[in-house]
Amino acid sequence: MKKFLGLALLFIASITLSGCYNTETTTFTLEDVQSQISSVYEELSPVTVAIVSYDTKAYDLSVGHGSGLIYDREDLEGSYRYYVITNYHVIEGQSYLRVLASKYYDAKVYALNEPEDLALLTFETTEDLQYFGTEQFDGEVFARPTIGSFVIAIGTPLDLDYFNTATLGVVGLTSNPKVIQHDASINPGNSGGPLFDLNGNLLGFNTWKRSTVVTPEGEISVEGIGFAISMLTAVPIVNKMRHEKEVVFEQPKLGVTVSNISDIIEKNYAGVRPEHIEESIKGVYVVSLTPLRPSEGLVFERDIITHVNDQPIESIDELRLLISEIEFGDKLNLTIRRYSLGVFSTIVVELTL
């Protein structure tokens, strides 16, 4: 048994890591591995952040979070604008976002690509924060891991008490160039967090894990099957998002979260009709807006949508039916009843989907 263990350790100690950014192959001993993990974490955890979403602009109740990487910075007059890469599904449908680094910063969605599950956020501050840099996004040469090479995932799984947790794993499969399969532990909250090799090269962004599989005997749990969006996919998309503010959705949507008027009165106002909702009004109540959707800047919270293309609506179901077959490029006219400064007005806005 001792002989077998010794051979196993010798094998581990001789694992070769290749595909590094400088394209050189590096061999690590077990002591090297431990030292490299600590070194990579110390260097790169300051540029790894949590992205927290909230229900309201008061930022008083968080409703979820993911992870991300501060990768670029732009100098402004007297301050800086930082750019954060994360997954699209981390920010999907969220109106209010904050980046958690050394403290919280209010953030905005800058660009996104829903099909490839990537998004770019920005936040501004006068503070001189660390950022990863764009070197590995500037060309076609970047780290490509081989099966068996070590990887480090940094992110915030489960809840914010686990901010910037590091986990170690190995690459399990690279046959699909768009993703990296690995067994570093990732859990809800790790989405959008970076995956590094032991040289500190960025390999990609963790996006999901396989947790179950259906067999003839039923559903069984799966361990150690996680996936990251590879740099082969991420580099051109991030560059387009950064430099062209590219926005790509899979299907058209208004970009509003709505509620039936009776439900909002009961839930938000304890059954007492507030002054900004008229007694006789019929329609759907706008709860929040989704960034970069066509309604942004035209429809606002607390608006009541009364008609779609002159067709009256009284419920969410009627709204869904009227927009169920919309396509990109279609135009919709929304009739809105809006309350502002004590005055009600009727407004018609045209959206191009």
Image (spheres, rainbow, N blue to C red):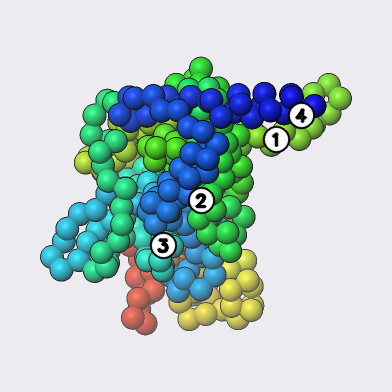
Residue 155 badge: 2
Instruction: Indicate the secondary structure of the residue bearing disc 4.
Output: helix
Q: Give me the C-alpha separation between circle 3 and circle 2.
A: 11 Å
Q: Which residue is mark 4?
A: 2
Q: Give me the C-alpha separation between circle 3 and circle 1.
A: 30 Å
Instruction: Look at 54% across and 65% down and name the residue there.
Output: 62
Residue 23 in sight from this viewpoint: yes
**In front here: 88 or 26?**
26
Instruction: Indicate the secondary structure of the residue bearing disc 3.
Output: loop
Q: Give me the C-alpha separation between circle 3 and circle 4.
A: 46 Å
Which circle, 4 or 1, is nearer the viewer?
4
**Compared to 353, does 181 lie above or below?**
above
**In front here: 68 or 164?**
164
Instruction: Indicate the secondary structure of the residue bearing disc 1.
Output: strand
Tell me, yes or no, whether the two marked residues, 3 and 2, touch with CB atoms within 8 Å.
Answer: no
What amino acid does circle 2 point to? Gly
Which circle, 2 or 4, is nearer the viewer?
4
Q: Residues within 10 Å of mark 1 (few under 14, many from 20)?
A: few
Instruction: Look at 33% across and 30% down and name the residue there.
Output: 21
- Taking the view exactly as shown, the residue that stands out farthest to the right is 217
Residue 101 badge: 3
Tell me, yes or no, whether the two marked residues, 4 and 1, touch with CB atoms within 8 Å.
Answer: no
Q: Position of residue 18 (x, y in %)?
A: 42, 24
The mark that comes first in sequence, 4 or 1, is 4
Q: Which residue is mark 1?
A: 223
Q: Position of residue 129 (x, y in %)?
A: 30, 61
**Compared to 136, does 76 lie above or below?**
below
